[in-house]
Image (cartoon, rainbow, N blue to C red):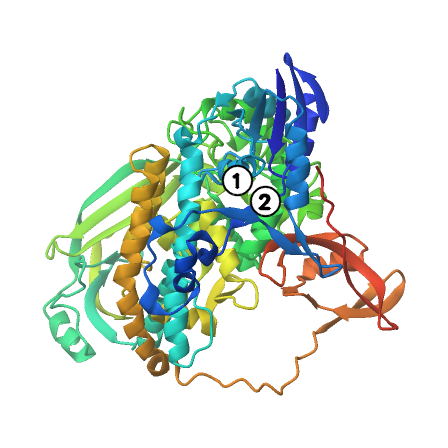
Amino acid sequence: MKYLIVTEKPSAAKNFIKALGGKSGQYAGYDYQIVNLHGHMMTFKEPEEMVNEDLRTAYKSWTLKYLPWQLTEMNWQRTYLKQRQPKTGRLKSTKTELTDLQQESRKNYDAIVIATDTDPSGEGDLLAWEVIDAIKWQGKVLRANFVDEAPKSIRQAMANLSDVSDKTQHGAYLKGETRSRWDFASMQLTRIATTSAKKAGFKVVAREGRLKSVIVWKIYEQMQKIKQYVKQPFYEVRFKDPAGHIFKRSLPKDDQVAWRYAEEALAQVEKQNYQPADVINEKHTKRRQAPDKLLDLAGLAAILAPQGYDSKEVLRTYQKMYEAQIVSYPRTDDKSVTPEQFAELLPKVDQIAHLVGVDKQLLTHRQPRATHVKPQGSHGANRPGLNVPTSMQALSKYGGSAAAIYEILAKNYLAMLAEDYIYDHVTAELKQYPSFKTAFNIPIAKNYKLVYDAQQALQDNQVDEVQNDATVGPKADPYIYEGTNKKPSYPTTKWLMAFLEKNNVGTGATRVSTLSEMSQGNRKMMTEKKGRLTLTETGNVSAIMVAGTWIASPKITKRLFEIMNEVDEFKVTMAKALDSVTQVVQHDMPIMVENAQQLVIELGKPKIKNAGTTKKSSEKIKGQFNGQEISFAKTWSDHTFSDEEVQHLLNGDEISFEAKTKRGKNYTATGYLAKQTYKGNSYYGFKLKPRKNKG
């Protein structure tokens, strides 16, 4: 047998070459050739190019009378992806690369092996099939599913290939294609929102989508709650014993009780009805708490955000660490690890513990926990990889957040190997007034909490556990407690991720990538600074436009994610799933048109931009470079260099970051600081390395 193995990107091809012993050769009884793509190589044509000629005007127009589209009229054809070359400014098509791949595929191969990422969204399967269709391959197609890019995993995947030649029966592909078509068709919502906002004087592109709209509306809604907040003090009678334990009445969910007063004098009147009371029914219950669940990428990003690492930085750095097998696969949907994955990492735990400063004597629970280790799963939860770094300092080459990422992931995983947290749960009540009760915990053995407390780390307002005196009573005295209604918390990455997790909207990786996308470029919808999320004008417009819509509803968005999974499981057809786009557009269009009338009321009149103003020059950075004092622009394209990136540049190191071409296409920019010349003038600045195209 002779296989053409198609990997997703150059770094993956390198790992396959390492695992199989070369770019081409023979392995396990078959001949093979390894090639790589560069992510997506094809893209949908413009809407008007996918319909009959007599419909093109309607599908090109942003006029609302032509919406919603009839999706059955579209042929869903793709075309070559075109990207502008940063160095030359010329557009380069993927056609040349795919033509070379087509010629390679005609060299008597028995099958193409899809060796792209095995991710929950079906993205890897989709981008592979886009290429297979583009090169008009008619032969057998096999799938190599691997949990990570370690040599053992790759060889195991190649030994267990599955036949997916009939893509209509390939669930992962169907899921990816459905999601891709759904998102493409949802541009109708962007057209509706943008057109309606423009009529109100707001010239922004109001991007709406499955997850974007939920996020932007939730942030806007929270900011409105903050603006509308009015501090309202309240007073109530409580009791306190000599050790400081508070005895109070339980509050119902609606917070409506007759014994909570707006005026202190009324509470003082009630207090006269109470005398010092005896503490009775003291109970001590020994309780245990298992270690927290393993973090997903969203939880990791939420914890790192207050340290100044935004979603884009975490995604980029984590991906590089994964390619080096220092951490596990990023875009996993798993919340546990398999017994095999647990056993594989177990011999490394002492080495990892030493690296991140965890006392290995705490790691006494080295048997699989049923809560964390389960037979089902593929990639396994986010965790340290099998390649343990030589030092934390050695991680800096992957990115500024690399050491922080590894420390959190490692400690969170190691906590699973520590014993349960044990504490004494104490309760008591007052003899004369039994509705007044107290309850508190006294730690007996912190155990896993000494390794890592993920639940505490994910709290927006971290409060150290109070070490109360275990002794209660013997009496408690009445007093007046003064409190206020709680002020809504400011939108943060932690707050947002907790909301999306609670409502089961998207996967951890999807949440992080969407947040990153929404925070980048000239049309960004928000800023993310040290974990605080602030909407831009575009974000505010987008939020107001989706008030009351289905596309901004967590329940609807959750259901849409469920539909994608049902396509994968052959419970729902792709056509049926795409009907939901039309339903959403039909429901949301009149609401958006009406919402546009609120823009000026909520945001004021749009600012008129002075066309005569000149563009502000970029902020300059000064520093020592090659032994001399220089200055260079802190911003390149739409990217502003972080402090860590500036230091790397001054050290002469290469850096990489996600950027966009002038046509809005994503690519990874890699370059270094260098002396350059423009129109005869010399200057220091970021120099982009040309990207190499590999066959």
Residue beneath the point at 48% across and 84% down:
607
- Residue 130 tag number: 1
Residue 191: give x, y in percent of width and height. 40, 66
Splitting the image into 4 quarters, where does residue 483 fall? bottom left
Instruction: Please tell me how crowded label 1 is: few (under 14), some (14-19), or many (20+) other residues with Cα within 10 Å.
Output: some
Q: Are marks 2 and 1 in contact (CB under 8 Å)?
A: yes
Q: Amino acid at mark 2?
A: Met
Is residue 178 depicted above or below 264 in this figure? above
Q: Residues within 10 Å of mark 2 (few under 14, many from 20)?
A: many
In the shown orientation, is residue 427 left or right of residue 10?
A: left
Q: CA distance from mark 2 to mark 1?
A: 8 Å
Question: Which residue lies at the image location 70% right of the left edge and 74% below the top edge?
Answer: 619
Residue, disc 2: 41
Relative to 428, 556 lies left or right: right
Mark 2 residue element = loop
Indicate the secondary structure of the residue bearing disc 1: helix
Q: Nearer the viewer, residue 358 or 216?
A: 216
| Mark earlier in primary sequence (2, 1) | 2
